[in-house]
Image: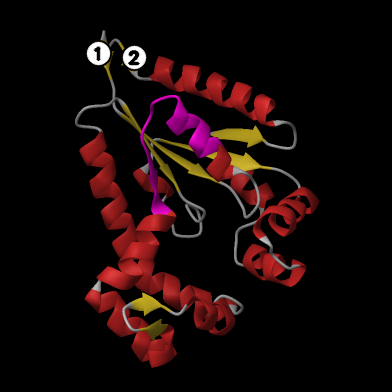
Amino acid sequence: MIQKKLKVGITGSIGSGKSTFSKIIADTGFRVINVDDISKELLVSDKLIKEKIIELFGKESYIGNEVNKKYLAEKVFSNSEQVAKINSIVHPAVIKKTESLILRNLEDVNIAFAEAALIYEAGMENIFDYVILVTTNEKLRLDRKVRFDNYTEEQFLKRNENQIPDDEKKKRADFVIENSGSLEELKSKCGFVLKILQGLILTNE
């Protein structure tokens, strides 16, 4: 019996609970790479990315060595065309760094997880063997962001508009986790998926 190595992506639209799902996986002992953190890091540390963003969106994009989040949120992330531009700068480097970290993790584990909000939007689903989609209805997602993250409805809708609809993601995902119930229900579903994945690493080939 040979054990395969699996690369598994975790995604979900804003307010879906993908980060909660990822934390449950991490709490069971698995490593979960946070791709959104990689993106934030590269915005600051990658000189070429920084130069291109300043060239496109102006020097106000940064305050010293830090990203001017308020400025970019207003100037970039509220406009789908601008979002596409910044993504074209950042995503290639993010995908490369993510792949590198996944392969490093797989040196001593059989399943490597990576959480990313924009797996499909960034065209990075091909680096994974399986993708898990965490989903729930838009009303509940909005309520979560307003209640727990102090979002306004307008902020939520702008971010949501820049993401592929869940109906489309469901067609492309390997596992779909409906997260409209309790935390215990989500933990149970997570455990079920982990058992399936652990079964998939075993092969007679």
Q: Secondary structure at mark 2?
A: strand
**Image vertical order of residue 109 relative to residue 147, above or below:** above
Asked if residue 16 is among those painted magenta in the image, a careful observer would answer: no
Write the residue at 43% across / 48% down.
Answer: 125
* Span shown in magenta: 21-35
Residue assigned mark 1: 2
Q: Amino acid at mark 2?
A: Leu
Q: Residues under labels 1 and 2: Cα distance?
A: 6 Å
Considering the image in quadrants, where does the N terminus appear?
top left
Q: Out of 28 and 135, give the one closest to the viewer.
A: 28
Q: Is residue 32 shown in magenta?
A: yes
| Residue 101 percent coordinates (x, y) | 26, 45
Question: In this rendering, does residue 173 appear at all?
Answer: no
Identify the residue position indicated by label 2 in the image.
202
Q: Residue at x 50, y 53 (%)?
A: 120
| Amino acid type of the residue tagged 1 in the rendering | Ile
Q: Is residue 87 visible?
A: yes
> Which residue, as the protein is rendered here, is positioned at the far right?
139
Above or below residue 83? Residue 109 is above
- 192 displayed left or right of 85: right
> Tag 2 or tag 1, which sits nearer the N-term?
1
Does the residue at mark 1 contact the one at mark 2 (Cβ under 8 Å)? yes
Give the numbered dot on residue 34.
Answer: none
Q: Which residue, as the protein is rendered here, is positioned at the far top?
A: 1
Residue depicted at x 38% and y 29%: 30
- Judging from the image, what secondary structure is the residue with disc 1 in? strand
